[in-house]
Amino acid sequence: MAAGTRTAYDANVPSTNPPLRVDHSSLVPLHEQVAAAIRRAIAEGEARPGERLPPARDLAAVLGVNANTVFRALRALREEGLVEFRRGRGVSVTGIAPRRSPVVAKARELVALARRCGYRPQVLAEIIERVSVELP
């Protein structure tokens, strides 16, 4: 390397944060693991508002999962308000709802539990209302 020449770093420089990973032997569905990993990256500032995420197919290749698994995770994050899809521009971090996303995730868990237990949405809403009044 010549004196005074600077090294240019590209997107392949490893991050100091743990890389996105999925555990194929886990009972947690792969799409939920992918969504959680991206959620963490957003919460920790690794993916900043306005930044584009890598293409879903690239993420899938890195994680060793099907591209549809990544697309499913990204759709869930879009519903939470964490990312937005833009035609021709890919998927970008919105910068809104980083505090709200854990609440949305827990609400999804609660709704899934209620459905498994046979509760209708209206009954679940009544239970939540009752509980919220009881809490200080």
Image: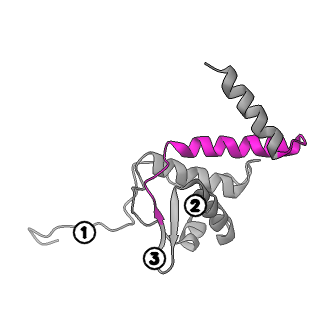
The three-letter amino acid code for the residue at tag 2 is Arg
Is residue 136 in sight in this rendering?
A: yes
* Residue positioned 79% across, 39% down in the render: 124
Q: Could you tell me which secondary element the residue under label 1 belongs to?
A: loop
**Cα separation between marks 2 and 3:** 15 Å
* Residue positioned 60% across, 68% down in the render: 60
**Cα separation between marks 2 and 1:** 33 Å
Q: Is residue 108 left or right of residue 63?
A: right
The three-letter amino acid code for the residue at tag 3 is Arg
The part of the chain drawn in magenta is: 92-120
Do labels 2 and 3 touch, CB within 8 Å?
A: no
Residue farthest toward the bottom in the current orientation of the protein: 88
Q: Which of marks 3 and 1 is in front?
A: 3
Dot placed on the residue nearer the N-terminal end, 2 or 1: 1
Where is residue 38 drawn, in percent x and y? 53, 54
Q: Is residue 108 magenta?
A: yes
Q: Could you tell me which secondary element the residue under label 3 belongs to?
A: loop
* Residue positioned 12% across, 72% down in the render: 2
**Cα separation between marks 3 and 1:** 25 Å
Residue 9's image quarter? Answer: bottom left
Where is residue 57 drawn, in percent x and y? 58, 73
Within 10 Å of the Cα at label 3, are there few (<14), some (14-19), or many (20+) other Cα atoms?
Answer: few
Q: Name the residue under label 1.
A: 8
Q: Mark 3 points at which residue?
A: 89
Q: Which of 77 and 19 is in front in this view?
A: 77
Q: Name the residue under label 2.
A: 78
Q: Residue 46 carries which label?
A: none
The C terminus - image quarter:
top right
Dot placed on the residue nearer the N-terminal end, 3 or 1: 1
Within 10 Å of the Cα at label 2, are there few (<14), some (14-19), or many (20+) other Cα atoms?
Answer: some
The three-letter amino acid code for the residue at tag 1 is Ala
